[in-house]
Image: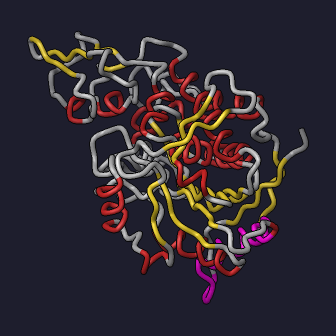
Amino acid sequence: MNPSKVYFTNLRTKIGVSQLDKLERLIRAAGIGEIDFDHKMTAIKIHFGEPGNLTFLRPNYARRVADVVKSLGGVPFLTDCNTLYPGRRKNALEHIESAYENGFTPYATGCQIIIGDGLKGSDDVEIPVRNGQYVKTAKIGRAIMDADVFISLSHFKGHEATGFGGALKNIGMGCGSRRGKMEQHAAGKPVVSKRRCVGCRQCAKQCAQDAFTYADKKASIDHTKCVGCGRCIAACNFDAIYNPNDDAAEMLDRKMAEYAMAVVDGRPQFHISLVIDVSPYCDCHGENDMAILPDVGMFASFDPVALDQACADACLRQQPIPGSLLDDNMHREGFCDHHDHFKNTSPESEWQACLEHAEAIGLGSRAYELIEV
C-alpha cells in the first residue's frame, strides 16, 4: 500500500494569524475542498468533554471546521454518541446540556448538535464490517450513518484502555451506540487484587453497572454486570484492579478498528487531529490530569490510520513533562521501560494492535508522507 499523505502544522503563530487560521489553512491544503459538500449533511464527530474536564477541544476549533464546510456548500452538525459510564452524557438530554456547558452552543459553533444514537442510546443501525474478524455488524448511531459526509475532529491524548485516543477511537468507539460500546468492551473484564485493595470505593463510583460489592473492606466485581469498560482500572490509585485476560486490550483495539471501518467505509470522509493538552486519560473523565507531553500541533488526512500513526510518532519523539503521571511512572521503583510513552502511562494498553488491524482490514495505511503546511 502506498504511503498516505498526512498534513501538519505547528502551533507557532505570527501577529495577525491565529491558530484557527492555521487550522483552516491546514485542512484546505490537505484537500477537504475535494469533497462534494453541495447541500450535503455533514457529521463532524467530536468529543464534547465530560463537565469538569478542561482538556477537550475548544468549541472554536469546531466552529472553524463547520465554517469551512459551509463555505464549501455543506450543512454541518456536531455529533457524538451516548456513553456507558456514569456521568452527564449517557442520554441525549444530559449530553446536549453538557455540550452547551462546555461551550458547544449553536451560537458558538455555528451549527447544531445531534446525538448520534438518539435519546437513550438505542437509536442505532447495524452496519456490516468489510473484512471484519471480530464484529459481524457494528452498531452505529443512526444519525451518523444518515449523514452524507463524515468528518472526525479528534483530541489526540492518552487513554487508560487503548493507550491513546485519536481518530480511530473517536470514530470507532465514539460512533458506537451504547450496545455498540458494550460489544467493543466485552472481551475483557477486570478483577481485584485483595492484597492491594484498601476499600476506598473509588472504583464503585466509576461503575455505571453497579458491579462492585465489598466484604471486609475489599472490593469484588460481579462479572455478570461488568461490561469491561475499564474505568475502574484508571480510578484505582493502588493498582488493585487489573485485567487478567492478556489479550483483552488487544481485542478492544481490534474491535475498535472494525467499528471505525463500519463508519467510514465507502463514504466521503476527512480526518483532523489536534495533539494538544495530551492528558493521560480520556476526556470522558470528569477531571483531567496535567499533560504528559508537550503540545505538538495539528494534523489532517483522508486516511485515519496514517493520521493516528503520524500523531503517535510525533508524541513518541517528545520528552515527558516533569511532574506528570508519565514522569511519575518512569521514576517508580521497579519501573519497566516500554520505550513507549503511552504504554509507560497505561501499561495494560496495546495501541499498536489497533493500527495493525486497521491496516490489515483495509481501513488505511500506517505508512505516510508528512507534509508541513
Q: Position of residue 329 (x, y in %)?
A: 42, 32
Q: How is the image coloured?
A: secondary structure
The answer to whether residue 323 is seen in the rendering is no
User: What's the residue at 64%, 71% (across, down)?
Assistant: 23
Where 129 falls versus 145 (above or below)?
above
Q: Main secondary structure of the magenta part?
A: helix
Query: Which part of the image, by quadrant, shows the C terminus?
Result: bottom right
Q: Furthest residue to the bottom?
A: 16
Q: Is residue 307 magenta?
A: no
Query: Which part of the image, by quadrant, shows the N terminus?
Result: top right
Q: Nearer the viewer, residue 85 or 163?
A: 85
Q: Is residue 87 left or right of residue 156?
A: left
Point out the stretch of residues depicted in magenta: 14-33
Q: Is residue 15 magenta?
A: yes
Q: Position of residue 97 (x, y in %)?
A: 30, 63
Q: Nearer the viewer, residue 22 or 30?
A: 30
Where 28 falls versus 264 (above or below)?
below
Q: Position of residue 310 (x, y in %)?
A: 71, 48
Q: Nearer the viewer, residue 158 or 173?
A: 173
Q: Position of residue 70 (x, y in %)?
A: 64, 78
User: What's the residue at 24%, 29% (across, down)?
Assistant: 203
User: What's the residue at 39%, 18% (across, down)?
Assistant: 189
Where 91 falls versus 109 (above or below)?
above
Q: Nearer the viewer, residue 318 or 309?
A: 309
